[in-house]
Amino acid sequence: MAVGSLTDTIVDESTKRAESFFRTAVLSMEKVYLSRNPTAKAVLDLVLAADGNQICYDHFAFRTFGIDGYGIDSIAKFFLDFGYTRREELRFPAKKLKALWFAPPSYENGSYFGGPLPRIFISELLVDEMSPQSQEVIKKYVKISGNGNKYASLASTLGCLTWETPSYSDYQQLARESEYAAWTLVNGFSVNHVTISVHRLKSHIGNIKSLNQFIEDQGYKLNSEGGILKVSPDGLLLQSSTVADSIIFNFVDGVSEPVPCSYIEFAERLVLPQYTKLTNEEIKEFHRRDGFEVGNADKIFESTSKDQLTRKIV
Ligand code: OOG
Ligand code: NI
C-alpha cells in the first residue's frame, strides 16, 4: 500500500514535468504562428480583450506530404508520446487528402499555460495520386530533408523547414495542381491554424454567429466557401475561419513572391441531445459534440486558397 502510493506520487511528478515540457513546446509552435500571421494575432487579441483575457483552443492543425515517413505520423508522434490518442480518419478524395485527429490526454486537466490542451488535426497529401511531375518535386524535397521527418515537431517549434528553401518553379508546379501541396512546400510543419473554442468564451461572443459578426465588424474577412458558417449534418459542430495571411517568400532562385501562410478558426461544439438537461455549470467538454466533419473541413481547407485570398469583402 505504502509502496504503491509512493510509486503513484513519482509517476504523477514525472507526468507533470513532461507535461510542462510538452506545453512549452506547443506554446512555441503557437508563438511562431502568431509572429507570422498578423490577422490571426490581431483577431486573437480582439477576442481576448472582449472576453476577459482567457481563451481555450479547440484544436491545432498541421499539413504534411503523405510519403516516405513525412505524412501524418511524422508530426503525430510528438503528440502520441505525450498522451494523445488517435481518433477518426477523414477522407477528401477530390482534394487527394486524408486526415486524422487526436484527442488530448484529458480535456479537464491542466491548469496553467491556458487550460485544456487542444485536439490535434493532421492531414496529408496522397502524393501517389499526384501527377508524375508534382511527385518528382515533392520527392526531391523530402529526399533533401534526409531524416527531417523525425524532427517534424522540432521544425514546428522553431518555425523552419526541414528541407532546403524551394525554388519558385517547383512551387508553381505544385500550385497548379494542389494549393495544399504548394502550401506545404513553403510552410512545412508550421502550424496551419489554431482554433478558438467558441463555447468556452464567457461573454456575448460565446456563440459563433455573434463572434463572426464581431470579427467582420472589425474589418476582417472570413472564408466564405460554402457560406461563412459551416454546420455539420447533425447541427452540433459549427465552424468558421478567417482567410489566411500572405507573407513574402524568398525563393532560392531569387524570386520573392507572396505565398499563403496561416489563418485562425472558430469552433462551437453544442451539447449532445442526451445531455441538454444539464445545467451550464454541469456541462463539460465531453458532453459536447466531439470530433470533426468532412463537409465542414472540406470548406475550411479553402481558407488558404487563392480564390479566398483575392476575394473582395462585400
Ligand atoms: C485543415 C482544414 C480542416 C477543420 O477543423 O475541419 C479543419 C487545413 O486547412 O489544413 O481545420
Ligand atoms: Ni480546423
Image: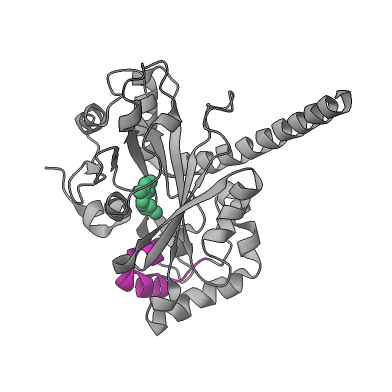
Image label count? 0
Spot occupied by residue 224 in the image (x, y as percentages of width and height): 20, 47
Residues 59 and 1: in front is 1
Spot occupied by residue 63 in the image (x, y as percentages of width and height): 45, 57
Identify the residue shown where x is 22% and y is 57%: 307
Based on the picture, tell me whether residue 166 belongs to the magenta stretch.
Answer: yes
Rendered image quadrant of residue 2: top right
Q: Pick the quarter of the image with the C terminus.
A: top left
The extreme right residue here reads: 3
- Which secondary structure class fits the magenta region best? helix
Rendered image quadrant of residue 68: bottom right
Residues 265 and 259: in front is 265
Residues 34 and 12: in front is 12
Q: Left or right? Give the position of 245 relative to 212.
A: right
The extreme left residue here reads: 314
Q: Left or right? Give the position of 75 relative to 241.
A: right
| Residue bounds of the magenta highlight | 165-183
Q: Is residue 21 visible?
A: yes
Q: Is residue 270 visible?
A: no
Spot occupied by residue 232 in the image (x, y as percentages of width and height): 26, 45
Identify the residue shown where x is 43% and y is 36%: 58
Colouring of the image: one colour
300 to 141, vertically: above or below: above
Spot occupied by residue 235 in the image (x, y as percentages of width and height): 24, 39
Identify the residue shown where x is 64% and y is 70%: 146
Q: Pick the quarter of the image with the N terminus.
A: top right
Based on the picture, tell me whether residue 300 belongs to the magenta stretch.
Answer: no
Q: Left or right? Give the position of 8 relative to 230.
A: right
The extreme bottom residue here reads: 132
260 to 127, vertically: above or below: above
